[in-house]
Image (cartoon, rainbow, N blue to C red):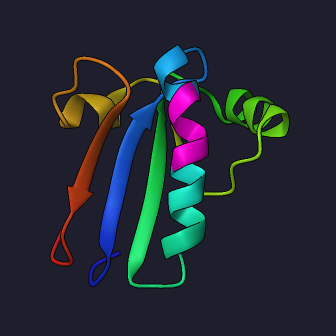
Amino acid sequence: LRGKVVLLFFWTTWCPYCRAEMPLLEKMWQHFKSEDFAMVGIARGETADEILDYKKKTSFSFPVASDPKGEIFKLFGNVGVPRSYVLDRNG
């Protein structure tokens, strides 16, 4: 994703704050996705099946990744969700 501004955010399907944030994130994704912008949601402690089940119940279309063991989450030193980072074009 080098060369793009990246919004990286950690979330879970059970987090009420994450759920409240999803419509805003989707709106941002729809507005900026055609520009030099990327968005990746990392679902901490969630399996791919859990994410798919949640996605069926909601209407977000931005890319998400599963982090079932929380390994990526730990790399960022996170202590809670939701948590967002903006990465510049150089990473």
* Residue at image coords 52%, 16%: 15
Is 70 on the left or on the right of 5, as rendered?
Answer: right
> In this rendering, does residue 20 appear at all?
yes
- Dividing the picture into quadrants, the one containing residue 69 is top left
Q: Measured from the top left, where is residue 30 in percent x and y? A: 60, 67
- Dividing the picture into quadrants, the one containing residue 23 is top right
Residue 58 sits above or below residue 16 on the image: below
Q: How many numbered marks, from 0 up?
A: 0
Is 66 on the left or on the right of 76, as rendered?
Answer: right
What span is colored magenta in the figure? 20-24
Is 4 on the left or on the right of 64, as rendered?
Answer: left
Q: Measured from the top left, where is residue 62 in percent x and y? A: 60, 57
Residue 13 sits above or below residue 64 on the image: above
Magenta: main secondary structure: helix
* Residue at image coords 31%, 31%: 73
Q: Measured from the top left, where is residue 66 in percent x and y? A: 54, 38
> In this rendering, does residue 68 appear at all?
no
- Dividing the picture into quadrants, the one containing residue 36 is bottom left
* Residue at image coords 22%, 17%: 79
Q: Measured from the top left, where is residue 7 in percent x and y? A: 35, 57
In this rendered view, identify the residue nearer to me: 50 or 14.
14
* Residue at image coords 33%, 65%: 6
Point out the image quarter for the N terminus. Answer: bottom left
Residue 72 forms part of the magenta stretch: no
